[in-house]
Structure formats: structure tokens, C-alpha cells
Image (spheres, grey):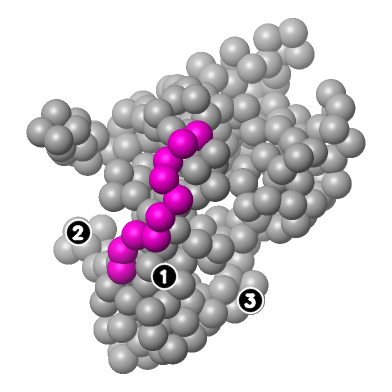
Amino acid sequence: MNQHGYIWMRRAFSLDISNSRAQMVEAQREVVSIRGHLVAYEAEGDGAFFQDIRPQQNMAREQVSSGSEVPLEIHTEQAFSDRRPDYLCLGCIRGDPAAITYLLHVDAIVQHMSAEELTLLQQPLWRVGVDLSFRLQGVRDEVRGPVPILSLDFTDGWQLCFDQDLMRGITEEAEALRHKIVQLYYAERQGICLEAGDILLIENRVMVHGRSAFRPRYDETDRWLVRCFGMMNSRFTESVVKVQDS
Ligand SMILES: [Fe+2]
């Protein structure tokens, strides 16, 4: 992974129209396996390793990947879970020029915080709700935490866990810090417009991401991504042991 927390493989290959999804799945499988294991979650996307992300009319204004007509607010994947993935991989089969994926690195947040704010951000001061995509598949709608937003890893540096939509500070100061992170995102974010054949690998523990609004036609010309998740080998092993023990 580069210092920016993502790898954008532009036109990684030219897609064969008749076989584009299968090609993309194989390419993403290889990309993720360089760094770890593919992971899937029983309660999201029917437990599939590779999920098709296409706009759905009944989800157009929701904070889910199949939404479109409102911006997808910034988040790290599955902020509510301690088994969240280390990597998010997006493969683009068909792009939309209006759909911009936005990224912001944790370091861009840290450098705008005072020492006092950094201390607070490492305290468990935020409660977090469960993603709608998990609730739709039966996970109980509950508020978890409180959790910190930032943590400082001895070898990997600053890491973050954040969700603009689902996180709330338990104090006024904590809420103000949540708003400050959102403002920093709008000021400092980087935009990427995925095109057919692109693969974007995002390091979920150091990057927040979001997406612009766009206007689908709800037909076969709409934006189409294939998404999968990965977990670093060491964390994957730890998770398997935890599941076996629970
Ligand atoms: Fe996401």
C-alpha cells in the first residue's frame, strides 16, 4: 500500500464485455490476496465475497452503497464492528462521470488537530449505530460503544474508525470534533472517478471514504462496481480464533 492509503489501478485491464464480471472478480481476488484474505460478512450482501454495487431506485436516498441521489457520507467500513475489514476493494465494470469516490487520509485529520483534541479523539467518546445494509439483513438495530475515533499503532501509526451518519459524540466536545472531521473532509478530500477496468484498493484503517450524488437511469447503462473486502493475514487469524472461541 502506498503512503496515501490507497492504490488506484487505472484501466487495470480492458474488459471483455461478454465476461466482464468474471474478469473483474478474478482480478480483485488477486489484488486482495497480495495483502491478506478475502472476507465476507454473513449479514451483508448475503455473505458473498464479491458484491455487485448498482443503484437501486428504492435505496436512492439512503446511506448505503446502492444509494445514488444523495452524497454517501464519509465513513470507514463497518465502524460498528471490531471485525471490520482492513481493505475495501472496488472494481469498476461501468463508471458514471458524475459519481466521484472521495478519500481522506487519517494523517490529514491529525495534522489539523491540537494536542488536546488528539487526546480526546483517542478516548471512547462516540457511540455508533449498525449500518443499514446489515440491519436490512437482520442485524439488531442497536447503538454500540462508546469507541474512540483515533488510535495510535506502534508500527502502523495513526488509525481511525469513523462514520458521519452513524456516530454521535457523548459530550458536546466530542460532537464538535465529529463535525470538525467532516469539515476537514470537505476541505481536503481527494476525488476519484472510477472508469471501466479500474480497481481501487482502500486501506480501511487509515482512510475515510464517501461518494458524490449522481443520477442513475435505473437501466443497463448505470454505474456498476464489484466490491470485496480483505483482512490482513495476522488479523484474519486472530478473528478466526475469536469466532471459534465464541
Ligand atoms: Fe463504504
Contact, mark 3 vs mark 1 (Cβ under 8 Å)? no
Cα distance, mark 2 to mark 1?
15 Å
- Indicate which disc, 2 or 3, sits on the residue closer to the N terminus: 2
In the image, residue 197 lies in the stretch drawn in magenta: no
Amino acid residing under circle 1: Asp
Visible residue check, residue 123: yes
Query: Which quadrant of the figure has residue 10?
Result: top right
Q: Quadrant of the C terminus?
A: top left
Cα distance, mark 3 to mark 1?
14 Å
Q: Is residue 42 above or below residue 8?
A: above
Q: Is residue 141 above or below residue 128?
A: above
- What SS does tag 2 mark? loop
Query: Which quadrant of the figure has residue 115?
Result: bottom left
- Indicate which disc, 2 or 1, sits on the residue closer to the N terminus: 1
Instruction: Tell which of 146 and 237 is nearer to you.
Output: 146
Find the magenta span and give its range: 137-146
- What SS does tag 1 mark? helix
Visible residue check, residue 188: no
Please report the residue visible at 37 percent of the width from the left and 72 percent of the height from the top.
126
Q: Which residue is mark 2?
A: 155
Instruction: Tell which of 33 and 1 is nearer to you.
Output: 33
Contact, mark 2 vs mark 3 (Cβ under 8 Å)? no
Please report the residue visible at 43 percent of the width from the left and 33 percent of the height from the top.
43
Q: Is residue 68 left or right of residue 165?
A: right
Predominant SS of the magenta segment? loop
Q: Which residue is mark 3?
A: 187
Circle 3 packing at 10 Å, graded few (<14), some (14-19), many (20+), is few
Circle 2 packing at 10 Å, graded few (<14), some (14-19), many (20+), is few
Q: Is residue 107 left or right of residue 19?
A: left
Q: Which residue is mark 1?
A: 107
